[in-house]
Amino acid sequence: MKKAENIIVGISIGDLNGIGSEVVLKTFEDTRMLELCTPVIFANVKTLSFLKKSFESTTMLHGIDRLDQLVIGKINVLNIWREGFTLEYGVNDPIVGQYAIKSFVAATKALKDGLIDVLVTAPINKYNIQSEEFKFPGHTDYLNQELEGNALMLMVQDNLRIGLLTDHIPVNEVASHLTEALIKQKIETVRQSLIQDFSINKPKIAVLGLNPHAGDGGVIGKEDEEIIKPVIKKMFEKGTMVFGPYSADGFFGSGQYKKFDAVIATYHDQGLIPFKTLSFGNGVNYTSGLDKIRTSPDHGTAYDIAGKGVADFNSFKEAVYLAIDIYNSRNQYTEISKKPLKTKEKHL
């Protein structure tokens, strides 16, 4: 098991015209963070040194050109680019978007190669990152291509965990994506993540219905009765503690979610609206189902407040904490899995 400060947290810098650099640097102004991990920011030390003046950050940066130059206990900045370019807070700039992707692609490669232990991604703008070389809706889809597994967006804040059956697709396409294979895969991904990433031995999972009142027995749509419910029944009979589909409208307001270790929503806003209402800016987006660990804050670039020094960095700090916690949980899970089962000796 690694010492805490030797856990290497890679950070992709996100959109430099947004609040990413501010929340990253503010997080590590508290030097006690360096007792928990050693960060390496994939960017350029001159760029960040220039930007930190905008919000009067006291964070001391250590520039490096290769990851083998990383210094434990310092805030390392790996120089991914050398050239200068124009930055203007609050502006949606495709050039800046390409630097966000340079940072993210380099950080993902380092994660894939085992040169960093976990990855925490600062917010990007999904519009300005698009190019001939990068045609992905966001971080998750690229990670799913590059890393082994089946990526699933799991929003986390303390004991509240909300996963998604479908994420960044139009609402009018959700029903057509709900197949037995997809639902089974997503439930199993959440179950396995709760066991190995959150150390919950026998997790209880709730699944929300697609239609109002979970279809009301087929009166308001057939998907809940004919697709979702049979999968839940089969998996429950085979030992998975999964329940539903539940009517989504009263599930959170009634506090019913507190009875479960995770909730799976059928589409993006069904899960994200209650999550962001309940998490009060401290939530974390965790990409479960992969062989590597990636987290991010639950907010976007926030162009409207970028450069003003007023951005709340709690969600980013929580993303760092969660990445470290999951890293430790996975190591413990691996160690336990390797131990042979003890059997009683029979005496004749």
Image (tube, helix red, strand yellow):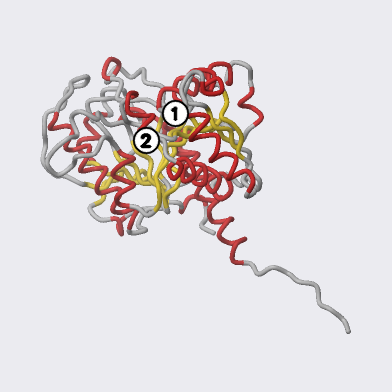
Tell me which amino acid carries mark 1. Answer: Ser
**Residue sitting at the far front:** 219
Give how far apart the Cα atoms at labels 1 and 2 are.
31 Å
Q: Circle 1 is placed at which residue position?
A: 315
Q: Circle 2 is placed at which residue position?
A: 177
Towards the viewer: 193 or 79: 193
238, above or below 299, in the image: below
- Rendered location of residue 24, percent (x, y): 36, 33
Quadrant into which the N terminus falls? bottom right
- Rendered location of residue 269, percent (x, y): 41, 22
Find numbered disc 2 in the image and state the secondary structure of the residue it sits on: helix
Q: From the viewer's perspective, is the residue at label 1 or at label 2 nearer?
A: 2
Q: Residue at x 24, y 34 (%)?
A: 49
Find numbered disc 1 in the image and state the secondary structure of the residue it sits on: helix
Q: Decide if residue 74 is on the left or right side of residue 235.
A: left
Towards the viewer: 29 or 156: 156
Mark number displayed over residue 303:
none
Closer to the chain start, of discs 1 and 2, is 2
- Rendered location of residue 303, percent (x, y): 26, 19
- Rendered location of residue 266, percent (x, y): 45, 30
Tell me which amino acid carries mark 2. Answer: His
Q: Residue at x 53, y 30 (%)?
A: 225
